Amino acid sequence: MALTCYIIDDEPPAIKVLEHYIRQSSQLKLLGSSTDAIRGMEAVQEQRPELLFLDINMPRLSGIGLVKALPHPPAVIFTTAYPEYALEGFELEAVDYLLKPVSFERFLKAVNKAQRLAAAPEPHDTPSFLLLQADRKLYRVPLAEIRYLEAYGDYVKVHTDGQLFVPKTTLNQLEEELPADAFLRIHRSYLAALSRIRYLEANFVVIGEEKLPVGRSYREEVLRRLQEKG
């Protein structure tokens, strides 16, 4: 089912680009747009879109301020020419952050993420994302996109569907932050998303096309959890 959406951006050319992209996507239904943040906020409260494409740097009211002012904000995809605003955008639990000029490929990736989140909402008491600090940035990584985690010296490699993150932390610390029913320790150096394991073969599990080692002391638990999953 298509998500209803609305655009707020003080630059008409930026709105035109998004409108063009939305017309090409069967996943979205555009309810309207506004170049004025205040009027746009009023329209959002009245029309209640499921997804909001929102510029951050606008006169009178910023996109950040707009989201904070809404009592029940919809899912938000921020769009801006200023990457320094990304951290605050992610802290507001935005679906994604698009840097202008926005390419159609990057737009589709953000929309697909919004669709996944809308189709499979997490319980309110269960985190749906993992905050990772890497490359001097704070990333909000959806748990649904994480394939496995790998110890890497003083760092951890977090393998996701579209990107590799290498935060300076320990595998044990991230294991404590992840839901135990969704992630499984398979080796002292590997933590895998249970739903991503295709099968167990000898002393390996297969995720996608990759084989990951299963430690001898972990094998029995891995087998039990896979049987429960089946």
Image (cartoon, grey):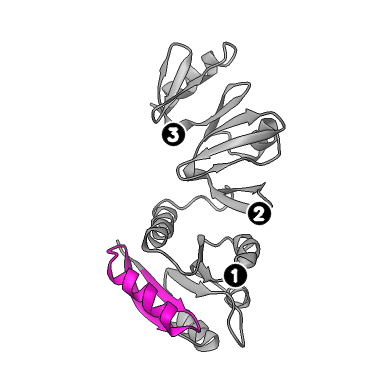
Residue 47 visible in the current orientation: no
Q: What x and y, as percent, mark residue 136?
A: 69, 52
Mark 3 residue type? Ser
Mark 2 residue crowding within 10 angstroms, few (<14) / some (14–19) / many (20+): few
Mark 2 residue type? Lys
Q: Which of the 4 quarters of the picture holds residue 150?
A: top right
Q: Nearer the viewer, residue 2 or 166?
A: 166
Residue 195 is marked as 3
Among numbered discs 2 and 1, the one appearing first in the sequence:
1
Q: Which residue is mark 2?
A: 137
Image quadrant where one finds the C terminus: top left
Q: Is residue 17 left or right of residue 214?
A: left
Question: Is residue 25 depicted above or below 18 in this figure?
Answer: above
Image depth: mark 1 or mark 3 in front = 1
Q: Please give the range of residues in magenta.
A: 4-33
Q: CA–CA distance between discs 2 and 1?
A: 14 Å
Q: What x and y, as percent, mark residue 157?
A: 60, 35
Check disc 1 and report its element: helix, strand or loop.
loop
Residue 191 visible in the current orientation: yes
Mark 1 residue type? Tyr
Q: Is residue 84 left or right of residue 41?
A: right
User: Residue 5 magenta-drawn?
Assistant: yes
Residue 82 is marked as 1
Q: Nearer the viewer, residue 46 or 175?
A: 175
Check disc 2 and report its element: helix, strand or loop.
strand
Q: What x and y, as percent, mark residue 170?
A: 70, 33
Q: CA–CA distance between discs 1 and 3?
A: 36 Å
User: Residue 201 magenta-drawn?
Assistant: no
Image quadrant where one finds the N terminus: bottom left
